[in-house]
Image (cartoon, helix red, strand yellow):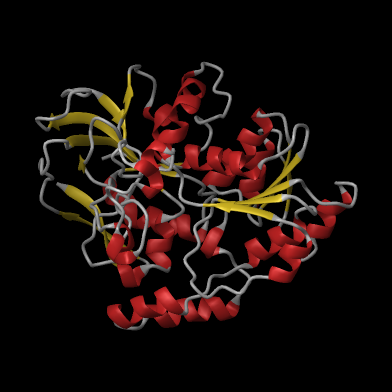
Amino acid sequence: MKAVTWQGRRSVGVVDVPDPTIQEPTDVIVRITSTAICGSDLHLYEVLGPFMHKGDVIGHEPMGIVEEVGSEVHRLKKGDRVVVPFNISCGRCYMCNQGLQSQCETTQVKEKHSGAALFGYSELYGSVPGGQAQYLRVPFGDYGPVKVDSDLPDERYLFLSDILPTAWQAVDYASVPDGGTLAVLGLGPVGQFAARIGKHQGFRVIGVDPVPERRAMAEEHGVETMDYSPDVSEMIRDTTLGRGPDSVVDAVGMEAHGSPVASFLHKAVSLLPDKPAQVAMETISVDRLAALHTAVDLVRRGGTISLSGVYGGQADPMPMMTMFDKQIQLRMGQCNVPRWTDQLLPLVEDDADPLAVMHLVTHTGGLEEAPELYEKFQKKEDGCIKVVLKP
C-alpha cells in the first residue's frame, strides 16, 4: 500500500509499505477514505526527529471503512464506516475507566515513561504505524473506533479523531465562568475549534494569531481577533476591565515563535545522532515558550490556563513567582478522545453544523501530494489552515 512516511527533518515521502494485517484477535483493518495532517504532525516534521525512524508511517486523524475484523471483535463488521481516535486505549483499565484514555495502562509506553500509545507518533508513543496511508491496523476494535451510521461527508466526522475533542477538552479544562471571557492563543485548526466551542457555549472569545487568514476565518464565526504583538496582553486587558480574560487556551505549543535560543537548540539537537539527541530531548530540551509566557501574563488573577498545544521540553524555564502570585490554575494533557465523543457526535451530525466542522478544510489532495502540503502547512502559505488527504 501507499503511505506517507517520515524521511528526515522537514522531509516526508510517499512510498510502498507492507499492508497491515490482523495481529491480535481484537484488531480491525480499516481502509482509509480521509486522513488529515495535524498541527502536531509538524512537531515530527520539525522538532521530534530524534524519536523518529526513516520510513515511519505517520498520521493520526483517519477515518474509513472496516475491511477485516479479528475473531474477538463483535461491535464492528466488514463494511462499517468508522472514525479512528488517535489514542490507542483498551477501555477496561483504571485510567480508561477514569476517562483518561490518553493514559491507558494497557498501552502506556513505559520504556519511554510516556502515556498511551498513539497512531503514527514517534518512538515516544510506541512507533505505531499511522493513518496517512491506504490501510490502518486498529487495535481494540470493540472500543476505539467510532461507528458512523450516516452518509454525511467524511469532513462531518473526521475531526472526531483528534482536533475537535482536543479543542473541546481545552475549553472544558479552561473552566470559563458563565458569561466569562476566553482568550485563544493560536488560530490553527485546534484554536479555530476552541474559539467556536467557546462561542457555542456562550462566552466572549478573543482569538490571537499573527496570520491574517486565520484571524479572518475566526471572525466569520463571531470571534474577536487580534494580531500577535508585544503589547497584545495590554490591549486585551484594556477590553476586560483591566483584569485580563478569565481563561486562556494556549493552542500553539512548542512551535511558538519568539525564542531564538530555543530555536537554535532545536536545530542543534536535530544534528546529533539519534541516541545522544534523545538524551538531550529527554533531559535538557527547552521549548519556545512565547505563547505560554503570554498566557501567564495575560490571564486574570485567579484565572485558568488550558494547554492544548503540545510541549516537549524537559527543562523549560517558567515564571513560577508570577504564576504563584497570580494564583493561576493550569491544566493540560493529551486529549482523552473517547471521553468526549458522546457530547460531540450530535453536534457534528446536526444539520445546522453549530461548530462549523464543514468550514475548516482549506486544502485537499491525494497521498502523493503530502510532501507539498506538509511544506505549505508548515510555512502557513496559501492560506493553509487544515489539510485533508484522500487516499
**Residue at horizontal 35%, vertical 16%?**
150
The count of marks equals 0
State whether residue 320 appears in this view. Answer: yes
Q: Quadrant of residue 57?
A: bottom left
| Image coords of residue 309 (percent x, y) | 53, 55
Determine whether 64 is above or below 303 in the image: above
Compared to 136, does 149 lie above or below? above
The residue lying at 31 percent from left, 42 percent from top is: 89
Residue 388 can be seen in this image: no
Q: Quadrant of residue 25?
A: top left
What is the quadrant of the C terminus in the image?
Answer: top left
Q: In screen coordinates, is 190 left or right of 270?
A: right
Residue plotted at (28% across, 47% down): 132
Residue 227 rendering spot, x and y as whole percentages: 72, 55
**Residue for point 39% across, 53% down:** 373
- Which is nearer the eye, 243 or 17? 243
Residue 329, given in percent of the width and then of the height, sits at 67, 53
Name the one closer to the observer, 124 or 79.
124
Q: Which residue is at the front of the view, 103 or 345?
A: 103
Give left or right: position of 107 versus 173: left
Residue 121 in percent (x, y) is at 33, 56
Residue in the foreground of this view, choosing between 13 and 331: 331
Query: On screen, 147 above or below 58?
Result: above
Residue at the outermost front position: 94
